[in-house]
Amino acid sequence: MPTRDKKNATYIADEEDLRSEAGEKFLRMKYSGRLGRLRAYFGERYPRIRLLDVGIGYGMFLKALEETGLSDLHGMDPFPDSIEIARRNTSARLAEGDINDPAWPFERNSFDAITCLDVVEHLAEPAVFFLRARDYLRDGGVVVVTTPNGGLPYRMRS
């Protein structure tokens, strides 16, 4: 059973580090604003939304979502070992898939929210994520993307 996905060069953490007291404190701080924005956007509907997390890492954001009461959760990642690790951290329905794939392993127009946290900066063509996500989002849905790369929005505009 892997505790780190060595093939996933974009995710260098070890599962034990993330599950430690310090790791959980860090993740609570990291995710609190994102969780708050989703709750504010959906309001009373929040507990019933259907959400897809793209680029799940080890499933820690999905775990945080479950802790807020969400249950219709899905995740996608191109790395099988990351998915295996994530299955220990979340009960979300997980599938192997790549952002660049023309079709994702989910029903189109079926998600209220699609999240992609700290992933798009690793893509050769970040705009592809937004084009694909549009096909899987319901009317009135929201896409939440974060990136530590401050220059990415300018690169995407060009």
Image (cartoon, rainbow, N blue to C red):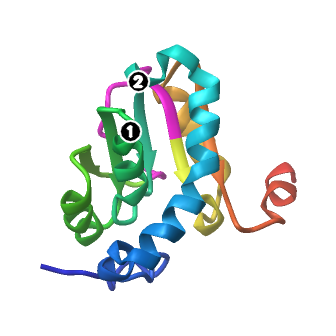
Q: Is residue 63 left or right of residue 46?
A: left
- Is label 2 in a helix, a strand or a loop? helix
Residue 144's place in the image compared with 11, above or below, is above
Say whether marks 1 and 2 touch (CB < 8 Å).
Answer: no
Is any part of residue 32 visible from this angle? yes
The residue wearing badge 1 is 103
The residue segment tinted magenta is: 99-114
Q: Which residue is mark 2?
A: 47
**Above/below status of 22 relative to 87:** below
Q: Indicate left or right for 131 with 86 as reference.
A: right
Residue 110 highlighted magenta (yes or no): yes
Point 48% across, 52% down: residue: 100
Tell me, yes or no, whether the highlighted magenta stretch contains residue 93. no
Distance (Cα) linking label 1 and label 2: 28 Å
Q: Say which quarter of the image contains residue 50.
A: top left
Which amino acid lies under the numbered mark 2 shown in the image of this protein?
A: Pro
The residue positioned 44% from the left and 57% from the top of the image is 55
Quadrant of the rendered image containing residue 59 = bottom left
Which residue lies at the image location 57% right of the left edge and 30% below the top edge?
39
Regarding mark 1 in the picture, which secondary structure is present there?
loop
* First along the sequence among labels 1 and 2: 2
